[in-house]
Image (cartoon, grey):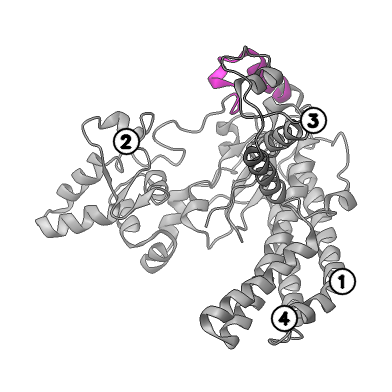
Amino acid sequence: MADIPRPAVEHYELILVLQADAIGLARQTWRNVAPNAIDASFQAQLPSLVREVQDLRWAAALEGSAYGAFTLADQGTYVPPSDFTDIDGLIMATPNNGVVADELSVSTIRAKQAITRSGTTQGMLAGRDALAGILATMIADTARQASGVDLVTRSGIGYVRMLNPPSCGRCATLAGRFYRWNQGFARHPRCDCVHVQTETKSVDGAKAEGLIDDPYEYFESLSDAEQVQRFGKYESQAIRDGADIFQVVNARRGRKGMYTTEGTTKRGAFRRANQKFSKRATPELIYRNAEKWGLDREGTRALLRTNGYILPGGQNPRGSIRGQVEGYGQMGAGGMRRKASQAVIDARLSGVRQPGNLYTMTAAERRVADAEWAWREVQLGRNPWTSAATERRWGRPAISPDYPLTPDIAASVEASYRYWLARGGQIYTR
């Protein structure tokens, strides 16, 4: 495993302490929640709970915005920030841009749902664990958010994603990737991966500095039982038999029964390589069939190869299909859209992006911006889901009539805006 710079390790350890404090706070609060009056007894404690949570978040935000400078210094360089993070402003809302008290109160809903399913004892435990999970995730996300803000203020700086084992398969496949500031930090609830800031301009440079982690090294560092726990029984065997770790992990996203839809679209790697196959088997189905048909290891590997798990490029830590490349953002069309691509290039050269520029937003910021624009259109009495609306926003010629705004459309736009605003544009995976 690559060595994580010491300041990043110390940052992670401090965040763990703050998370432990938050979990202790959750348990202490929940002891005073009465099963026969969950809402009332929780609400009575909520003001003091919010104050203590905000104190912990303030500490997490301060640490998240400060450790990047020490991480850069540890690598023998230092880039000063153009601005300093507004800690108080950062923690006014939750990392999902919601209300702190409302997010904490979700635990009471989880408790009542669990009581209905499993009884009072198990339901109260579920509520306590839900509150602990909410607080732990809020602390980690606050620190990450502050680190991301600090990252943007330092010219020419990107970050490498580092694992903090034990890690799940999804995080393992993202380990060591070099990201620009305009690429979001994908994570799932309770993910504890960290940013490691670096001035590196290329992946090769990051690797030379010891910042690139290898998901295969992480996989091989686990025992067989740990591999199964983190990746799955058949998935682990496929990786041991030479399958591409990215293909194996990603196949779980589109699993439907014993098949997966991952990679089967017209642009999917599996579909492009196997035009005559309409279905892609999961590793589990492959190994079950191999056993049923009496295939040896090479026969099983042939099935893995046919189904797009063993690739011609072998087990490449940076990915055997495309490797680790930087594009022109989700609106750049691979460099074909001049304005979008130039905005990304300019921002990379200067290390500073224009606030509100759709071309250089992260995917999460773009979701919120799109939803907000649609909501403004509704407030003006206009339908945002027409080509005429596209013309108003982008200046592209309208090719269809400007259909009127209906109550159903208005309600849908409002719901969408509420949803993405509450989540801060983030897509959470389970």
Q: Of label 4 and label 2, which has the lower sequence position?
A: 4
Q: Which residues are magenta?
A: 328-348
**What secondary structure predominates along the stretch shown in magenta?**
helix
- Residue 156: give x, y in percent of width and height: 73, 29
Depth check, mark 4 against mark 2: the one in front is: 4
CB atoms of marks 4 and 2 within 8 Å: no
Instruction: Write down the residue under mark 3.
Output: 355
Q: Of label 3 and label 4, which has the lower sequence position?
A: 4
Relative depth, front residue between 20 and 361: 361
Relative depth, front residue between 323 and 134: 134
* Disc 1 residue crowd, few under 14, some 14–19, many 20+, Cα 10 Å: few
The amino acid on which the numbered mark 4 sits, given as a three-letter code, is Ile
Q: CA distance from mark 1 to mark 3?
A: 34 Å
Q: Residue at x 77, y 35 (%)?
A: 379
The amino acid on which the numbered mark 3 sits, given as a three-letter code, is Pro
Q: Residue at x 70, y 43 (%)?
A: 414
Q: Residue at x 54, y 47 (%)?
A: 175
Q: Residue at x 61, y 54 (%)?
A: 193
CB atoms of marks 1 and 3 within 8 Å: no
Q: CA distance from mark 3 to mark 4?
A: 43 Å
- Residue 302: give x, y in percent of width and height: 19, 43
The amino acid on which the numbered mark 2 sits, given as a three-letter code, is Phe
Looking at the rendering, which quadrant does residue 212 occupy? top right
Can residue 211 be seen in this snapshot?
yes
Instruction: Write down the residue under mark 4.
Output: 38
| Disc 4 element | helix
Residue 47 badge: 1
- Residue 350: give x, y in percent of width and height: 76, 23
